[in-house]
Image: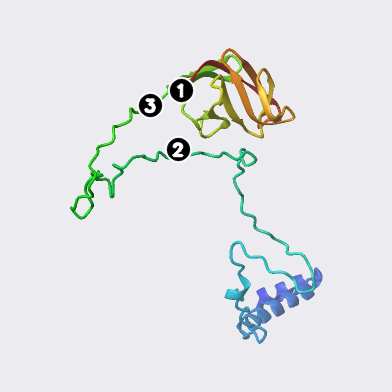
């Protein structure tokens, strides 16, 4: 008992009794508060699931009936055709065989014999006409960037230059007089130099060059500069 008296006397002298009382009250209150069930605990609201009508399908734009513009517009990129302005007409030669011996289904018919096997009274064999010789047409050119020209020998008609992935020119054949090679010019290329532009130099859709003539083309590059290409016709033979 003397220990508790001394402790009580010491706390009284040092005025620590209020502090001890607060500590004791806190020790009693904490278990009570922690053991009490909370009335305000409510389960968090479940997240709303987006309905099928709230998801916009790709490529579809919903317009506001009040005239408001849609926030998002999905655009589908289209590949531009640099030769869309030039229309290429291909003429197919049709050979019609003349003479009485023209076949029905590919078989020759004797003019003196009817298809059913009877005779018509006249039996003659037409003379075969010699086939005309096909003229050899060929064009050879040099084309490429300045200082790195590449030779294209015996260029076939409708060949893109310098390549299919980068068609700045398309060989369109030999002119009617057989002296010039004609090329379709991309709208991205601006020609200058020798040759004849059709319909005019300001709108050069078709370029005609003779053997020995050279044309320079300026093409915008992706970096904002200009890339130069050179076309030199070496041979035009019809």
SS class, disc 3: loop
Task: Locate the N terminus and report the quarter of the image it occupies.
Answer: bottom right
Label 3: which residue? 132
Label 3, label 2: how far apart the Cα atoms are: 14 Å
Where's residue 16, x and y in %? 78, 71
SS class, disc 1: loop
Label 1, label 3: how far apart the Cα atoms are: 15 Å
* Quarter holding residue 62: bottom right
Where's residue 2, x and y in %? 67, 76
Q: Nearer the viewer, residue 39 or 115?
A: 115
At 75% from the left and 71% from the top, the residue drawn is: 64
Residue 93's disc number = 2
Q: Nearer the viewer, residue 43 or 195?
A: 195
Against 84, is 12 above or below?
below
Q: Residues within 10 Å of mark 1 (few under 14, many from 20)?
A: some
Q: Nearer the viewer, residue 12 or 50?
A: 50
At 61% from the left and 61% from the top, the residue drawn is: 59
Label 1, label 2: how far apart the Cα atoms are: 16 Å
At 60% from the left and 83% from the top, the residue drawn is: 35
Q: Is residue 218 visible?
A: no
Q: Is residue 105 visible?
A: yes
Which callout, 1 or 3, points to the residue nearer the camera? 3
Q: Earlier in the sequence, mark 1 or mark 3?
A: 3
Residue, far top: 212
Residue 110's disc number = none
Against 136, is 105 above or below?
below
Which callout, 3 or 2, points to the residue nearer the camera? 3
Where's residue 154, x and y in %? 45, 21
Left or right of 98? Residue 16 is: right
Label 1: which residue? 137
Residue, far left: 117
């Amino acid at each position: 008992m003397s220990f508790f008296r001394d402790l009580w006397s010491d706390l009284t002298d040092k005025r620590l009794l209020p502090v001890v009382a607060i500590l004791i009250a806190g020790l009693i209150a904490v278990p009570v508060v922690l053991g009490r069930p909370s009335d305000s605990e409510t389960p968090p609201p479940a997240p709303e699931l987006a309905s099928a009508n709230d998801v916009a399908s790709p490529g579809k734009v919903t317009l506001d009936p009040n005239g408001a513009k849609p926030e998002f517009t999905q655009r589908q990129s289209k590949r531009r055709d640099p030769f869309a302005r030039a229309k290429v007409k291909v003429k197919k030669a049709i050979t019609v065989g003349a003479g009485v011996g023209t076949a029905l289904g590919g078989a020759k018919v004797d003019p003196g014999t009817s298809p059913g096997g009877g005779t018509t009274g006249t039996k003659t064999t037409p003379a075969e006409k010699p086939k005309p010789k096909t003229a050899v047409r060929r064009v050879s050119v040099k084309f490429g960037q300045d200082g790195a020209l590449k030779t294209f020998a015996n260029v076939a008609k409708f060949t893109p230059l310098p390549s299919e992935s980068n068609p700045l020119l398309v060989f369109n054949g030999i002119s009617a007089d057989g002296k010039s090679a004609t090329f379709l010019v991309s709208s991205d290329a601006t020609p200058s130099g020798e040759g004849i532009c059709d319909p005019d130099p300001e709108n050069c859709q078709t370029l005609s060059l003779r053997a020995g003539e050279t044309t320079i083309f300026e093409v915008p590059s992706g970096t904002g500069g200009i890339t130069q290409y050179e076309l030199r016709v070496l041979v035009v033979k019809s």
